[in-house]
């Protein structure tokens, strides 16, 4: 069962990496990032509702857990997303990614302080290798230092860590949890759009293309990765799953190289090797 959980966590990271591909194309079409967030989660919720319609036992569970998940999971997940988005305006994607992907550290610290979970030295060793590897994946020349952006990125990472931990405590049905997170995130996005007086409409001249990319973002960049990550939490520890899901930057670099025309440097290759090595150690040595 452990191997299945590890596979789920790694595939989740792979699918999360597709967000960059779809988002780049959608932003090029002139869609506002907040509107993009709204459509992403709205369509994700619709996909899940169609699927859940044919699974009767999940309907009652969704109703029972609705309030708890709307007030916790969805706010934590969506809050993390928005903080990350705003941090990008201050420090750029490189440093944002490095800071955000230290969230396994916060997962471990929170679990140690509040739940008394002890973490092995091997875990910290692997985490250190992964963080070093992520530094190799980003272009250090593009990093901008700004205290506001750094604080926002740290808060985004902490909220995502809390989301991961809370997901293991409050739900036993991953598909129900994923649906509620998407609904809550869509509502939260809509409130921000109205408060900032932005438009939620898609560009009429490119609406077909926009809908195709949003569909890909919703299915491959939202529904499936969240669902797989939550499933992995049921099979392996949240610490182990969070470490393996940090494989996302590797796939992000690979997708950027093959589909977005970005360069693959020797530093990128070193970073990929380091992260894969750490992931291999995690998988080889069971908990």
Image (cartoon, rainbow, N blue to C red):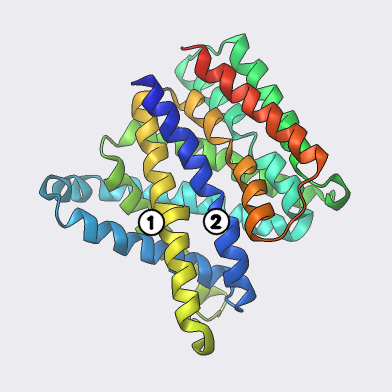
Where residue 55 sits in the image (x, y, percent)? Answer: 14, 49
For label 2, the SS is helix
Q: Position of residue 16 (x, y in %)?
A: 52, 48
Quarter containing the N terminus: top left
Residue located farthest toward the front when viewing the structure as drawn: 258
Q: Position of residue 246 (x, y in %)?
A: 58, 35
83 with respect to 69 (left or right): right
Residue 103 percent coordinates (x, y): 60, 34
Q: Which mark is residue 32?
A: none
Which sits in the foreground, 254 or 16?
A: 254
**Residue 182, numbered circle:** 1
Please, what secondary structure does the residue beneath circle 1 have? Answer: helix
Q: Residue at x 49, y 89 (%)?
A: 204
Badge 1 crowding class, 10 Å Cα cut-off, few under 14, some 14 to 19, many 20 or more, is many
- Residue at the (82%, 51%) spot, across then down: 146
200 in relation to 14, above or below? below
Taking 221 as reference, is 272 above or below it?
above
Numbered circles on residues, count = 2
Report the Cα–Cα distance between label 1 and label 2.
15 Å
Q: Which mark is residue 19?
A: 2
Residue 127 located left or right of residue 110: right
Q: Quadrant of residue 171?
A: top left
């Amino acid at each position: 069962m452990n191997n299945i959980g590890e596979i789920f966590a790694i595939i989740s990271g792979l699918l999360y990496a597709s967000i960059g591909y779809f988002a780049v194309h959608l932003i090029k079409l002139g869609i506002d990032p907040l509107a993009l967030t709204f459509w992403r989660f709205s369509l994700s919720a619709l996909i899940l509702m169609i699927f859940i319609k044919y699974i009767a036992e999940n309907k009652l569970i969704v109703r029972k857990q609705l309030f708890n998940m709307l007030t916790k999971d969805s706010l934590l997940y969506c809050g993390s997303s928005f903080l990350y988005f705003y941090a990008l305006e201050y420090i750029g994607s490189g440093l944002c990614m490095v800071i955000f992907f230290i969230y396994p550290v916060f997962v471990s610290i929170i679990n140690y302080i509040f739940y008394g979970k002890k973490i092995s030295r091997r875990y910290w060793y692997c985490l250190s290798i992964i963080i070093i590897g992520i530094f190799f994946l980003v272009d250090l020349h593009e990093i901008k230092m700004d205290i506001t952006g750094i604080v926002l990125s740290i808060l985004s990472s902490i909220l995502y860590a809390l989301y991961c931990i809370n997901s293991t405590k409050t739900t036993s049905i991953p598909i129900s949890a994923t649906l509620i997170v998407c609904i809550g995130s869509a509502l939260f996005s809509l409130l921000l759009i109205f408060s900032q007086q932005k438009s939620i409409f898609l560009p009429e001249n490119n609406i077909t293309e926009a809908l195709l990319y949003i569909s890909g973002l919703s299915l491959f960049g939202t529904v499936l990765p969240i669902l797989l990550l939550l499933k992995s939490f049921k099979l392996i520890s949240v610490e182990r799953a969070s470490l393996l899901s940090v494989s996302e930057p590797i796939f992000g670099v690979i997708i950027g190289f093959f589909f977005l025309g970005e360069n693959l440097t020797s530093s990128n290759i070193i970073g990929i090797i380091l992260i894969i090595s750490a992931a291999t150690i995690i998988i080889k040595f069971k908990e």
